[in-house]
Image (cartoon, helix red, strand yellow):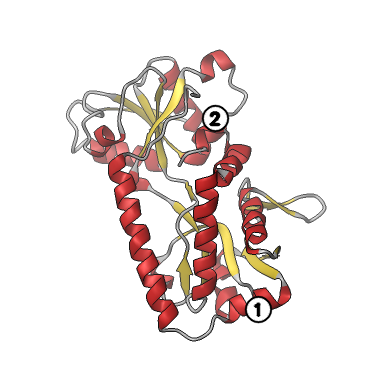
Amino acid sequence: LNPFHAKRLTKYRWLILGAIAIAATAVSAWLLLNSSKDEAWERIQQRGVITFATDPTYPPFEALDVNGDFFGFDIDLARAIAERLGVTAEFEAVSYDGLIGTLVTQRDDAVISAWVIQPERGKEASFTPSYFNAGVLLITRSDVDVTQDDILRYKWQAGKTLAAEYGSTGDALIRKWLRLVAGLKPVSSTDAAAAMQAVEDGSADGALVDAVAAYDYLRGDVPAERLYKLKVAGSIPESDAPYVIAVSAKSTVLLRELTRALYEMEADGRLGELRVKWFGEAAREQ
C-alpha cells in the first residue's frame, strides 16, 4: 500500500452514499415513466456524437493546448464515457456562467467542467453522481492514527495543532472548530504547501488543504524521503465540493446512461486510473 494513500470513506459513509444512489435511481425511474422522449439521447444515437460544453480555463480539469485542442482530466473522462456509450465526444468552449444555458437551448448534450451542483438550477438541469471531490482534505504524517469517524465527531482534532493557508476554506474550518473543539491550536500558513511543510517538520499535527493542492504537492517535486512522511488521512465532509456532469432536466435517458457509465468506471478501476494520471496515486480512491 502506498504510505500516503488512505481510504477515506468509512462503512458509515458508504451506507449514506448507497442510500443516495438508491434514491437517485428511484427518482430517475420515476422521471423515465413520467416524461416525454429524451431528444438529446436520440440526437446522440443518430449522430454517433455526444457534445460536451466546457470552460477550458481551469487546468488540470480542462484547458486548451497551443494548437487549440482540449485536454485535461474532465476531457479524458468525457472521452472514456463516450467510448462506453459507443459514440464520439466533441467539445465546445463556453464561459462558465453560460454552460447550463447550452443545455436549455439544446446546443450541447452535457456539461463537464469541474461543475459543482447548484440546487437553484434544478429546474433546468439534472446531475450525475460525483466523479471527483475537490473539497478539503486532512493531511497528516504517515504514522498518525486517525479515522474518518474521529474527524467527523471532532474527536481527533482535540488538542491538535492544525495548519492551513490563511483565508482558505481550511482556515475557515479551523476557526469554526475553535468553538467546538477543546485545545485546538491554529497555524496560519502563507500557502497550502507551507501548511503541509508544517506537518512535515512537526510544527503542526495536520493540515487542512483543498484536494487539488494536496494532490499536487504529494505528487510534485518533493524528495521521496519527505513525501512518504505524509498521507491523506481523511476528507472533511462539511467542505465537500463534488464535481458532476450536468444534462438538461429533460434528458432522463442520457442522465441514466452517464450515471451507469460512471458507476462502471468506478467499479472497474478506470475512473481511479484517470485520477492517478492527473493527480497522483493519493487521488485514486475518493
Q: Is residue 3 above or below residue 165?
A: above
Residue bearing the label numbered 2: 217
Residue 184, horizontal then vertical, whole percent: 24, 28
What's the residue type where badge 1 is placed?
Arg
Label 2 vs label 1: CA separation?
Answer: 42 Å
Name the residue at 43% across, 72% down: 121
Q: Is residue 129 left or right of residue 271?
A: left
What is the number of the mark on residue 43? 1
Q: Quadrant of residue 117?
A: bottom left
Mark before the other along the chain sequence, 2 or 1:
1
Secondary element under disc 2, as helix, strand or loop, is helix
Secondary element under disc 1, as helix, strand or loop, is helix
Depth check, mark 2 against mark 1: the one in front is 1
Name the residue at 22% across, 23% down: 159
Residue 40, horizontal then vertical, whole percent: 60, 77
Name the residue at 55% across, 32% down: 281
